[in-house]
Amino acid sequence: MDAHGSHCAAPATRPEAGGSFLVHPAGQSLPRYAGAPPTRRLRMHRALLALCLGGWVLHSTASPSTKLDGEWLCHEQVTGNTGAAAVQPHYVSIDHGIWQTDTLDADLQLQALDGQHYLGTWSPDTQRQLRQIAHLAADQLHYQDPRVTGTCQRLGDIAQAPATQRSGSWQFITLDQARPTQPAAGYDQIYSKQARYRDQRWKQAFDDWCRLSGLGGVRKKSVTPASRLTDAESFACQTPAAERNLGALKTAVLGPGGQIYMTDGHHSLSSLWEAPIGQGDDRLGKAGGGLRIPVQIQADYQHLNQASFWRTMRAKGYTWLQDADGKAIAPASLPRHMGLSGGLQDDAYRSLVYFTRGVGHEVPDDAPEFLEFYWAQWLRSPPQHLDLRAYQLDTLGRGDGSDHGYLQAVHDAATLMTQAPPDTAIGPTGQTAADMGQMPALHHTTLQQLARKGQTPGKLAQALHYRSKAATASKPESP
């Protein structure tokens, strides 16, 4: 846009041999940028910063430079309507003069002004402002346009993961190889498992490993005090390995460098990461990132650069890019590991939806990825606007309207789910409440089972018990 708000015109390129020059819609031209005296280059540089101010347009007959080719991590400062600026990291991939970013589906076509300065025009979105790029050093860029400024650091070669299988197959991985595709998890769901892994039902961890491995449950008598979760030879599953049910495996895709990105199973894998390796005793150590688990490879994107990979992940619905507060993030902000200390945030709404299973919704067979997050997003959005700050989530409560405990929050969320019109849009591609597993009415028996106490406590009761113990254990001792 020029100073008068009209779009920069693009007259026919003047046939000159190599280099770059500026052309005005009236037909005037400035001398070539490359080779101009420093003072003139500075004036032209400022003219480019004005981005078509006065109608000047860059034209180049030079071949795209490959000096910028590679992967970059950029930190972009965006100025909003209020004037406040927010900094967001994102990936940029540059190849033969084409600048791609993970957060937009439009590309920048770069034109070299000299060995250090470039101008980018958007394609196919020609309504966007031009962007100026300065190559400050071999591994550093700076860019700006009227709305954003950013700095980029060149990424080293992506570490090649161990030999991986192709799409449609399965393979064993260690938990520390599993990269999250969501920024948050429902901690209370993980806490519920941790409580069970540490009481008289500690063999549940071995049972979960067998089920996640497509081998049915564990043979309970095969688990002895000497059994270790990290040693698959020390216990036995119900199904022989040769008859593994591949449909029971958690799913992943192969990304650049063969990195493994999980599209399902964040809570299950994080729960096993935190599990004691034997006898429900933390003194024996936790399973941690070295625990091996098989996963199903549903897509192979090893050939893509970072920007194209994350564009594909967004388009396929294989990533959830909202943080624990429901705010959008870029893929570069995703944590690197599973587990409670790997960077996953605690999303209270995601925990809430977990506890509404069997109370207000069921997980359908054809559930989309991140089903619980879509329900959580719906609950926290208007007109539902279920505000968890109105509840006391550290107390169990009765769930009968007499208090504001956690069980009441589950009751109220499930009520909203069951009372929504069945054709209410919830899912990523128009899936309705009915498609997303909506139950016809709130199931009161299952609700009360969540709060059951005693030898076999309910899921919610054990989650709060473990959370309380973990909080106490993390407090520093009094001097």
Image (spheres, rainbow, N blue to C red):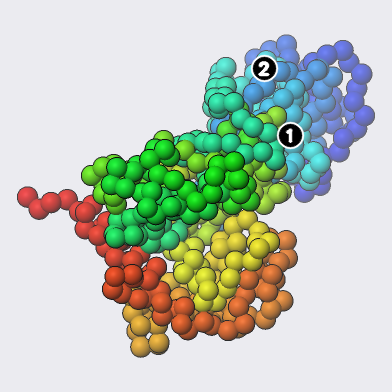
Q: Give 192 or 333, whichever is nearer the viewer.
A: 192
Q: List the residue tagged with mark 2.
A: 67
Amino acid at circle 1 = Leu
Local secondary structure at mark 2: loop
> In what quadrant of the picture does the N terminus appear?
top right
Residue 101 visible in the snapshot: no
Q: Is residue 258 left or right of residue 96?
A: left
- Residue labelled with disc 1: 108
Q: Is residue 468 left or right of residue 259?
A: left
Structural distance between the alpha carbons of marks 1 and 2: 16 Å
Q: Is residue 322 left or right of residue 403?
A: right
Q: Quadrant of residue 434?
A: bottom right
Decide which of 364, 61 is in the foreground and name it.
364
Which residue is farthest front?
221
Query: In the rendering, at what x and y percent does residue 255 appear?
Result: 63, 35
Which quadrant would residue 231 be assigned to in this image? Answer: top left
Residue 60 as seen in the image, left or right of residue 238: right
Q: Can you give x and y, in whole percent of width and height, for residue 45 in the image? A: 67, 25
Amino acid type, mark 2: Lys
Q: Check the image and report above or below for 435 versus 141.
A: below
Report the number of numbered marks. 2
Residue 190, percent from left and from top: 41, 57
Q: Residue at x 81, y 41 (%)?
A: 124
Residues at badges 1 and 2 in contact (C-beta under 8 Å)? no
**Label 1 crowd (10 A; few <14 / some 14-19 / many >=20):** many
Residue at screen point 47% across, 84% down = 444
Residue occupying the point 45% across, 52% down: 218
- The percent position of residue 465, horizontal first and vertical second, equals 29, 65
